């Protein structure tokens, strides 16, 4: 676990890509994209239909070791409006047990914005102690924790380049990596992420085994 | 002869040109007339193609076959070859005003022409395995092929034992079910396992091999240069001046190289030498089609003096009167080299001329071995490969696209294809399930099934879009994602995406023979501008580097192990080997020479462990990985290794005392299976299998990376699938391909068996002469390419040479 200070609060990052606010017993996770795999089914591409199961199990396994009461999902929890109807029994069961065990806050993501999904109550924004939990970061001075961009970063050594998911921490922003099994990434060098990357930025890269901290100078920008 | 042949027009045409039939051409016709399928094995320039077409021409001329029916199908592995053969065949047809329509159909054919071919089929159609698969997936395919009388497969030896061959073989079997009386003629270059090629061609008992012996051996020499053959490297820059002189003396030269990067560099260097303004062109697979066509045309018109080419010009294309072939770097295999030599002097009874230019010292030995092998008529053997299941999956869907099929019928048709002869029914059904809905134990995709049983219990596609999607994904070659290179409004060609990703704005690279400056990527185009720089950063394209063949490797070891062969070597090579034998040992024919010595590396003492295996880069790479693993476990603390075609060098913190334990076969193969699961190689092969089998679709330009996130990548699927269904069909395919391909498992285990109890370990106190090229290679492979490189290598080389006493 790596510790970050954000608006005078202490947060911890797990190597799986979950942000913990342990003082408040909160776990924060972005972009699950549940049932992304099966969303390609209608077009005849039959991806292994086990992504949602993997994603949910990983959440349950990671947070069970901490005292957590609340989970904030930062949007794009479901890949599309029919995601729930495509879920297998096992996935439905896992999702239900997550909701029963914890108080789950669903922030509204762009993948969910135009329709109703089940009985779920989506919020545009959730605020605790002046920290705003939203899907897509805004270029304002408010303290924000968001997802949406699926940031990845590239470091280059003499021999090879390594690209991995990352968490971006800049002044008043924390942008989380996407958590879903089948989610890809957007490099932090992309113009869309430029407003949130500067010399002060800290970039936490996730590998299978660990988290590595870089400053933006060490990253290819 | 003409009364046997009864094909006067062809006869007349030959006479007009002062030609006459070769015996084997008449033989082919006779055999075919008597109902045989024929495999014609002949060296290039033997009038093979005409022999292949004679039976069909004869039938068309004498039996006035029905109009508007496809009579003859010609299949070649190369698009360019279909065009070339089309042109060659049109010449007698036009000359004698025959009523025979010949057309080509490839990926480059316009939709208009394709549609016209549908309505009005030509008598003879020339196509590729992929275009054939597409044709057969049409709803009308049965009707289209039912009157087919002749099937000619050119360069068939290239297709056997490959995924493309699998696809072709399945479709041949399908054609057989549509028109069982169609006669087949296979045309092959000289190969070792002719029997297999015949079986691949046909399952009929009434089949014969016609073997045409070479009448004259080619004249091959190694280029004599004033400069010494360098210790390491692959670019042969040292020889450019001498190569240029040879080009000057010939009327049309092809300079063959092994990789596209080499092609670019050699082309560039030749132009720097070009004081006489010779017309030198370049030809390789990533250049834009129009540019390649232009070069080919100029060649056939004799308006060019030299072409620098990769394997894109390997096969039987006859683009003019080539009188000299120069091969830069070792050809890596005997058969491949013969093919290339055959490009010169395309006349059967005259010897071809070739010059070999080794790019380093080991390659000198290799080139000499290649010459010996050719003089002794040795050939490479290809390992047999069983039909791949991802290709079968693609085929099953293709069949369903053309018409509903019954499982048993299709199974019988499939096992009639040579590569699939041992396929079990269970496996076949597994493939059908996969095509249907992914073949998962979790039934998630029932509702979206691509194929389903109709009321007659036949499998049919569930909607038309399945067919359209199938058509976009046909083929067994999965290439890296390509981007177009644009200079202003002009498209110069394509380049792999990963190559461009490694560039920064302002970097220069060689492409299409000129130095370009990279600017940006926009809309899937690489925007470049011209630059005055002469020293570019060279594109390092993937592929093209074949490993040293087993047969050639034996020859090299023979050459090394017997001193009497050395007298013909140039002094520098002779000296090098003599010193090696004094200082250490020479590799033996059947054993393994291992050397260990300490050496400073970045100021620290390291222990080097060198194995002179001569088993090719792939097997050596695998061996290196496995040995490192083993050394790690024993506590030798290996740091890294480097593998070439000839040897492997591992360096470690602790000294390896017992080399036998490290090289023990059983222990090593245990590690292999475990290790493979974690390699990028397996992931890459999984991606290819996923695309070929249709699980994920080929990226179509314009559809990619448009939004904020990339589409799913196959690595993610791979990890999830491995966890949930480790025995899934596609993982099975990926594993098999990995063992066969880059890992070269068969070769590696044969090697380990061969050297067991036959290892000579030389413990040295410093680097040996034979190890020098290898240590230089370490720096080539691991040091960042910068302007300092050459200087650095030179300094290092001198340092090392004085260390072993060669300087």
Image (tube, rainbow, N blue to C red):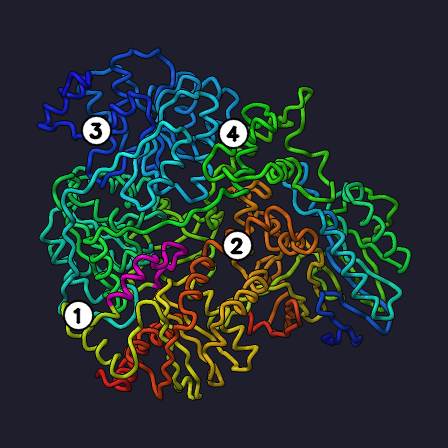
**Residue that numbered label 4 is attached to:** B413
**Residue that numbered label 2 is attached to:** B684
Q: Which tag, 1 or 3, sits closer to the chain's start?
A: 3
Q: CA distance from mark 3 to mark 2?
A: 45 Å
Residue B96, image x, y percentages: 18, 18
Residue A64, image x, y percentages: 84, 66
Mark 1 packing: few (<14 Cα in 10 Å), some, or many (20+)?
few
Mark 2 packing: few (<14 Cα in 10 Å), some, or many (20+)?
some
Q: Chain of mark 1?
A: B
Q: Which tag, 2 or 1, sits closer to the chain's start?
A: 1
Q: Chain of mark 2?
A: B
Q: Which of the 4 quarters of the picture holds residue A14?
A: bottom right
Per the rendering, the mark at residue B25 is: 3
Same chain, labels 2 and 4: yes
Mark 3 packing: few (<14 Cα in 10 Å), some, or many (20+)?
many
Residue B91 sits above or below residue B369 on the image: above
Q: Chain of mark 3?
A: B
Front position among marks 1 and 3:
1
Q: Chain of mark 4?
A: B
In the rendered structure, does residue B788 fall within the stretch colored magenta?
A: no
């Amino acid at each position: 676990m790596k510790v970050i200070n954000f608006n005078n609060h202490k947060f911890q990052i797990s190597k799986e890509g979950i942000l913990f606010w342990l003082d408040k017993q909160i776990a924060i996770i972005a972009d699950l994209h549940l049932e992304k795999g099966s969303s390609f089914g209608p077009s005849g591409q039959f991806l292994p239909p086990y992504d949602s199961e993997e994603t949910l199990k990983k959440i349950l396994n990671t947070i069970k070791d901490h005292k957590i009461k609340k989970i904030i999902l930062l949007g794009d929890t479901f890949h599309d409006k029919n995601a729930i109807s495509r879920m297998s029994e096992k996935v439905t069961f896992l999702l239900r047990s997550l909701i029963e065990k914890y108080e789950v806050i669903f922030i509204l993501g762009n993948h969910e914005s135009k329709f109703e999904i089940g009985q779920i109550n989506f919020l545009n924004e959730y605020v605790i102690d002046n920290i705003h939990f939203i899907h897509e970061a805004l270029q304002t001075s408010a303290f924000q924790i968001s997802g949406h961009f699926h940031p990845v970063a590239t470091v280059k050594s003499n021999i090879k380049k390594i690209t991995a998911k990352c968490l971006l921490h800049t002044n008043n922003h924390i942008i989380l990596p996407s958590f879903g099994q089948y989610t890809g990434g957007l490099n932090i060098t992309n113009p869309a992420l430029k407003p949130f990357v500067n010399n002060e930025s800290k970039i936490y890269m996730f590998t299978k085994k660990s988290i590595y901290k870089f400053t933006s100078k060490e990253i290819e920008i | 002869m003409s009364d046997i042949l009864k094909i006067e027009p062809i006869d007349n045409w030959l006479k007009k040109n002062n030609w006459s039939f070769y015996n084997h051409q008449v033989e082919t016709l006779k055999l075919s007339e008597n109902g045989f399928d024929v495999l014609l094995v002949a060296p290039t320039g033997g009038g093979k193609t005409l022999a292949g077409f004679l039976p069909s021409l004869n039938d068309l001329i004498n039996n006035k076959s029905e109009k508007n029916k496809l009579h003859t199908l010609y299949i070649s592995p190369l698009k360019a070859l279909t065009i070339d053969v089309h042109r060659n065949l049109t010449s007698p047809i036009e000359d004698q005003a025959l009523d025979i329509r010949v057309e080509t159909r490839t990926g480059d054919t316009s939709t208009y022409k394709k549609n016209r071919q549908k309505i009005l089929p030509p008598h003879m159609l020339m196509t590729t395995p992929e275009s054939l698969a597409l044709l057969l997936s049409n709803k009308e395919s049965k009707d289209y092929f039912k009157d087919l009388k002749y099937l000619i497969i050119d360069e068939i030896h290239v297709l056997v034992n490959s995924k493309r061959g699998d696809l072709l073989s399945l479709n041949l079997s399908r054609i057989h079910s549509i028109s069982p009386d169609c006669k087949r003629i296979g045309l092959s270059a000289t190969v070792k396992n002719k029997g297999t090629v015949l079986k691949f061609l046909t399952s009929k008992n009434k089949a014969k091999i016609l073997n045409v012996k070479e009448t004259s051996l080619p004249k091959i020499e190694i280029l004599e240069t004033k400069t010494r053959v360098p210790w390491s490297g692959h670019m042969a820059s040292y020889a450019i001046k001498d190569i240029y002189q040879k080009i000057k003396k010939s009327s049309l030269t092809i300079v063959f190289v092994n990789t596209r990067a080499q092609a670019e560099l050699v082309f560039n260097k030749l132009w720097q030498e070009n004081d006489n303004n010779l017309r030198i062109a370049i030809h390789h697979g990533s250049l834009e089609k129009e540019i390649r066509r232009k070069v080919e045309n100029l060649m056939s018109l004799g308006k060019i003096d030299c072409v620098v080419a990769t394997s894109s010009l390997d096969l039987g294309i006859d683009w003019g009167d080539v009188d000299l072939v120069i091969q830069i770097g070792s050809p890596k295999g005997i058969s491949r080299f013969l093919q290339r030599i055959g490009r010169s002097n395309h006349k059967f009874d005259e010897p071809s001329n070739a010059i070999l230019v080794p790019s380093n010292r080991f390659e000198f030995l290799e080139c000499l071995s290649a010459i010996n092998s050719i003089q002794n008529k040795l050939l490479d053997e290809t390992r047999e490969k069983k039909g791949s299941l991802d290709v079968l999956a693609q085929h099953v869907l293709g069949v369903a696209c053309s018409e509903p099929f019954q499982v048993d019928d299709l199974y019988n048709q499939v096992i009639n294809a040579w590569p699939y002869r041992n396929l079990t029914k269970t496996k076949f059904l597994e493939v059908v399930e996969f095509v249907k809905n992914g073949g998962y134990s979790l039934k998630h995709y029932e509702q979206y099934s691509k194929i389903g049983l109709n009321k007659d219990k036949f499998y049919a596609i569930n909607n038309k879009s399945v067919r359209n999607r199938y058509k976009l994904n046909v083929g067994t070659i999965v290439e890296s994602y390509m981007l177009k290179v644009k200079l202003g409004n002009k498209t110069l060609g394509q380049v792999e995406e990963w190559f461009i990703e490694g560039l920064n704005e302002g970097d220069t690279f060689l492409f299409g023979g000129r130095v370009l400056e990279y600017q940006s990527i926009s809309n899937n185009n690489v925007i470049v501008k011209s630059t005055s720089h002469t020293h570019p950063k060279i594109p390092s394209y993937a592929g093209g580097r074949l490993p040293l063949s087993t047969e050639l490797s034996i020859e090299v070891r023979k050459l090394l192990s017997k001193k009497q062969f050395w007298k013909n070597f140039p002094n520098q090579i002779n000296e090098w080997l003599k010193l090696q034998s004094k200082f250490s040992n020479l590799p033996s024919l059947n054993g393994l020479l291992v050397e260990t010595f300490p050496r400073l590396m970045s100021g620290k003492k390291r222990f080097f462990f060198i194995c002179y295996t001569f088993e090719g880069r792939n097997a050596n790479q695998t061996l290196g990985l496995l040995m490192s693993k083993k050394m790690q476990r024993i506590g030798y603390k290996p740091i890294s290794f480097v593998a070439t075609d000839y040897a492997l060098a591992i360096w470690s913190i602790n000294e390896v005392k017992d080399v036998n334990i490290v090289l023990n076969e059983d222990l090593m193969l245990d590690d292999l299976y475990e290790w493979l699961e974690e390699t990028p190689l397996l992931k890459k092969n999984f991606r290819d299998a996923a695309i070929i089998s249709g699980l994920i679709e080929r990226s179509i330009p314009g559809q990619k990376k448009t939004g904020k996130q990339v589409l799913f990548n196959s690595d993610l699927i791979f990890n999830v699938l491995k966890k949930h269904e480790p025995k899934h069909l596609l993982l099975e395919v990926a594993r098999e391909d990995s063992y066969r391909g880059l890992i070269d498992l068969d070769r590696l285990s044969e090697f380990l068996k061969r050297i067991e109890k036959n290892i000579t370990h030389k413990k040295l106190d410093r680097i040996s002469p034979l190890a020098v090229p290898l240590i230089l290679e370490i720096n080539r492979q691991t040091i960042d390419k910068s302007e300092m490189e050459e200087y650095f290598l030179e300094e290092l080389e001198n340092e090392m040479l004085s260390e072993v006493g060669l300087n």
